Amino acid sequence: MAKAKLDAQSLKTLIEQAEDTKIVPFFVEEWDVTVYIKTLTGQELMDFRSYPDQSKDHDIYLLSLSLCDEDGNRLFGFDEMETLKRKSWAAIVKLTIVAQKVNRFDEESFEELKKNLQIPQ
């Protein structure tokens, strides 16, 4: 049976209502706690991309956008990045790798996405 054709407003409503944020738990050994890392929204991605590349705080900035509780509420605001800077670099590196993977910033995830993407001809 063919699906009914949706008008533009119906499609827009479906997109607006879609729960498309992925939240991934990650145990941080150095902190003895499980934190959550979420996919960035379009606005957060634009903010991240506009952050100066030459900045040594790039990883911390990504984590301030990505670290969240189980419900997706950010743990650290931009004004709290100093708190993250004082934490174990080993933990920061691990969390950065997970945040990059969850958001498909790493080369492997990007290539996998391209390979598996079904584009109609």
Image: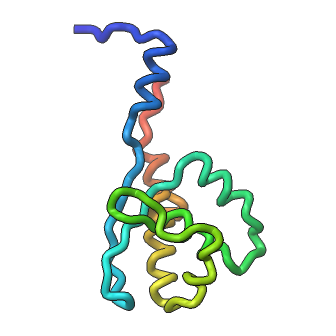
Q: Count all numbered tags in the image, as a single digit.
A: 0
Q: Residue at x 66, y 51 (%)?
A: 46
- Position above or below: 42 against 51: above
Image coords of residue 92 (percent x, y) = 50, 82
Image coords of residue 17 (percent x, y) = 40, 32
Image coords of residue 27 (percent x, y) = 31, 78
Q: Residue at x 45, y 29 (%)?
A: 15
**Colour mapping:** rainbow
- Position above or below: 46 against 64: above
Q: Out of 61 and 104, give the one closest to the viewer.
A: 61
Image coords of residue 96 (percent x, y) = 51, 74
Compared across the picture, whether 51 is left or right of 121 comes to: right
Corner quadrant of residue 84: bottom right
Quarter of the figure that contains the N terminus: top left
Residue with the most extreme left position: 1
Corner quadrant of residue 23: bottom left
- Position above or below: 40 against 93: above
Q: Out of 42 and 77, give the one closest to the viewer.
A: 77
Compared across the picture, whether 4 is left or right of 54 comes to: left
Q: Residue at x 31, y 76 (%)?
A: 34
Q: Residue at x 49, y 58 (%)?
A: 103
Compared across the picture, whether 5 is left or right of 83 comes to: left
